[in-house]
Image: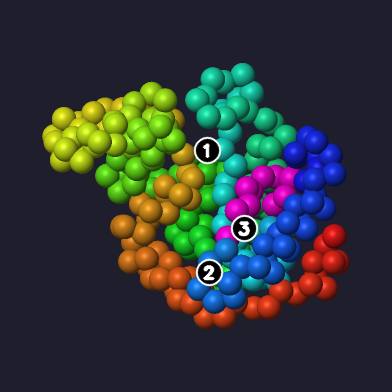
Amino acid sequence: QDSLDNTGKTYRTKMANLLALARVLPRRGSLPVLNTVVTPRNIGEILDIIDFAEEIGFFVSLIPIHLAATASDEHRFYSGDEALRFGPRDERRGRTVYRDIIRLKRRGARIVNSTAFLRKSPDYLINGSASWPCRAGEQFLSVSPDGLISPCHAFEGEWGIDHREFEQRFATAEYRTEVRQRAAGCEGCFRPCWAEIGLLMGRPDSLLEMARSQLSARRRRPDVNERAIVHHL
């Protein structure tokens, strides 16, 4: 963690902060999620991270790392890094770990991602592509701090509609046409904040899994295993 942050001595601080949050969050009705970016450097630790999250009463959301095609490629949001890219030698290990993750989810592990998302994640990590029904600007929107509404993060700073005008424009054919035209040039992504919505709206099984997660949050979360935290520290 210290190496990834490129600052040094951040791991213990982050673990202590997680423990503090785990102590003060309501034990019933909250659904705390530990977002975890999956890379070749931590793929062997993902199952341990899932166990750790459960020990402190958190769910885990696993996010495939997003990289440009090469280190020299231009991209609006991220660059390339060969050390964080899944190569041919990582493929078998990555697919094996994700199969184990899906088995854990079926057994009730606190993994917030849908099974459909988890099945597609290795393809994105290895090939840089994952098919999902992207309906940006229709099923989800992105709101900037200055009140501009865009179809998703990919449009921020490039095209947005003032929130005071959005309701009227959203219902027009011109709006839908412009979204489709702009989306056609998008590099694509597999971020769960967007992809999971597309899966939830199109797959009853994904919707049911999310409903189960929400119901789980209504029950009392497990007490914090402080001995486990001390061990990790």
In the image, residue 25 lies at what x, y percent? 61, 68
Percent across and percent down for residue 156 are 41, 30
User: Is residue 62 rendered magenta in the image?
Assistant: no
In this rendering, does residue 216 appear at all? no
Q: Is residue 156 left or right of residue 42?
A: left
* Placement of the C terminus among the 4 image quadrants: bottom right
Q: What amino acid is labelled 1 in the image? A: Gly
For the residues bearing labels 2 and 1, Cβ distance under 8 angstroms? no
210 is higher (above) or lower (below) than 97: below
- The answer to whether residue 146 is above or below residue 131 is above
Q: Earlier in the sequence, mark 2 or mark 1?
A: 2
* Closer mark to the observer between disc 3 and disc 2: 2
Q: Which element type, helix, strand or loop, lies under badge 3? A: strand
Find the distance from the CA under tag 3 to the CA under tag 2: 13 Å
Q: Residues within 10 Å of mark 1 (few under 14, many from 20)?
A: many
Range of residues picked out in magenta: 33-43
Q: CA distance from mark 3 to mark 1?
A: 24 Å
Res. 30 mark: 2
- Residue located 20% across and 41% down the image: 167
Asked whether the beta carbons under mark 3 and mark 1 sit within 8 Å of each other, the answer is no
Amino acid at dot 3: Leu
Residue 53's quadrant in the figure?
Answer: bottom right
Q: Earlier in the sequence, mark 3 or mark 1?
A: 3
Q: Residues within 10 Å of mark 2 (few under 14, many from 20)?
A: some
Q: Which residue is mark 3?
A: 34
Q: Residue at x 65, y 40 (%)?
A: 86
Q: Amino acid at mark 2?
A: Ser
92, 130: nearer the viewer: 130
Instruction: Give the class, few, some or many, for how many residues have Cα within 10 Å of label 3's Cα (few <14, many ≥20).
Output: some
Q: Which residue is identified by label 1?
A: 128
Spatial CA distance of label 2 from label 1 is 34 Å
Q: Secondary structure at mark 1?
A: loop
